[in-house]
Image (spheres, rainbow, N blue to C red):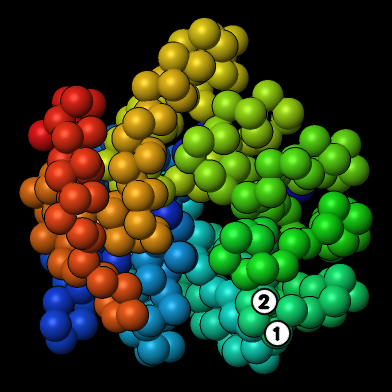
């Protein structure tokens, strides 16, 4: 039987940058904020962590730092995907070598592989590491969907244990096809409750960067049978989520982390600063939520 890496909320944590690299002091503060706030796992060097702008040595150094700082208190899931299968294998092996508890592996982007190609891509990655793999299906960024039947075939591989699913329309099919052993996580903050209601195990979350406790509690309440409490939390977050996605992620959430008082810095190019109008929207929603 496959054991999920986590049940609940995993934060897709931002990477704080300076002009010269990573601000490890602030990263430590953010990690401690997440653990204190109840996050059930930390995803480092994912989309929200701007992995696409990080050279491999920096990428692996951040994973290693997170592993050592967290020190087994909660699982560390390392973003290690690529649209080059050989590169994805190298990153995955390196993440395993520095102690990551699992990896998050995104659908290959730009190449637009066939479903057979997707299967072979993830199978090769799985064959080269022993740690658990969470697939990351995000058609909005990759312009490509991993079909339910392909995920079913991948779920038969021992160390492919879960999917971060951003295609809500196929969540029910995945639960039916893959069974209880395979964890389905919401990849979108505004669909946590719908995914849970269809058999999901939690969320890999952007909003948890600023509201870790509420994101964790939403899932906990659902599994404890407090469905109304979980729904109330989901509805309470919706306006904040709109502000957090007023521009492409992670531009707004990084601004939000800065508004909380952390020195997360700016996003790396080609991402730019949040516009003045959207910054005011974000500030207003964070104030309405009681965050600032």
Residue beneath label 1, please? Answer: 111
Distance between the alpha carbons at the discs numbered 2 and 1: 7 Å
Q: Is residue 135 visible?
A: yes
Q: Quadrant of residue 291?
A: top left
Q: Nearer the viewer, residue 201 or 230?
A: 230
Where residue 216 appears, x then y in whole percent? 42, 31
Q: Kindly check if marks 2 and 1 are in contact, taking CB atoms under 8 A apart as contact.
A: yes
Image: 130 above or below 161: below
Where residue 101 appears, x then y in whole percent? 53, 60
Image: 11 above or below 129: above
Q: Residues within 10 Å of mark 2 (few under 14, many from 20)?
A: many
Residue beneath label 2, please? Answer: 108
Where residue 100 appears, x then y in whole percent? 49, 66
Q: Is residue 26 visible?
A: no
Q: Secondary structure at mark 2?
A: loop
In the figure, is residue 248 to the left or right of 162? left
**Residue under the point 26% across and 37% down:** 36
Q: Nearer the viewer, residue 280 or 137?
A: 280
Name the mark on residue 190. Answer: none
Q: Nearer the viewer, residue 258 or 40?
A: 258
**Residue under the point 58% across and 27% down:** 193
Q: Nearer the viewer, mark 2 or mark 1?
A: 1
**Residue under the point 21% across and 82% down:** 21
> Quadrant where the N terminus lies?
top right
């Amino acid at each position: 039987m496959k054991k999920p890496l986590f049940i609940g909320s995993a934060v897709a944590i931002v990477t704080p940058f300076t002009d010269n690299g990573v601000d490890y002091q602030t990263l430590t503060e953010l990690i401690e904020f997440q653990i204190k706030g109840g996050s059930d796992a930390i995803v480092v060097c994912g989309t929200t962590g701007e992995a696409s702008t990080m050279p491999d040595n920096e990428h692996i150094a951040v994973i290693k730092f997170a592993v050592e700082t967290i020190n087994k208190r909660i699982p560390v899931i390392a973003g290690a995907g690529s649209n080059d299968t050989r590169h994805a294998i190298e990153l995955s092996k390196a993440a395993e070598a520095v102690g990551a508890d699992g990896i998050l592996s995104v659908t290959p982007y730009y190449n637009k592989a066939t479903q057979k190609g997707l299967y072979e891509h993830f199978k090769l990655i799985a064959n080269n590491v022993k740690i658990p793999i969470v697939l990351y299906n995000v058609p909005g960024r990759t312009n490509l969907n991993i079909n339910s039947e392909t995920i079913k075939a991948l779920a038969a591989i021992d160390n492919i244990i879960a999917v971060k699913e951003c295609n809500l329309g196929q969540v029910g099919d995945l639960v039916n096809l893959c069974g209880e052993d395979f964890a389905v996580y919401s990849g979108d903050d505004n669909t946590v409750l719908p995914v849970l209601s269809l058999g999901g195990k939690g969320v890999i979350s952007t909003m948890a960067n600023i509201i870790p406790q509420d994101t964790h509690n939403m899932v906990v309440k659902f599994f404890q049978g407090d469905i109304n409490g979980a729904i109330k939390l989901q509805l309470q977050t919706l306006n904040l989520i709109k502000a957090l996605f007023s521009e492409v992620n992670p531009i707004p959430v990084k601004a939000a982390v800065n508004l909380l008082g952390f020195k997360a810095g700016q996003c790396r190019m080609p991402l730019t600063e949040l516009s003045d109008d959207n910054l005011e929207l974000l500030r207003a929603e964070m104030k309405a939520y009681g965050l600032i």
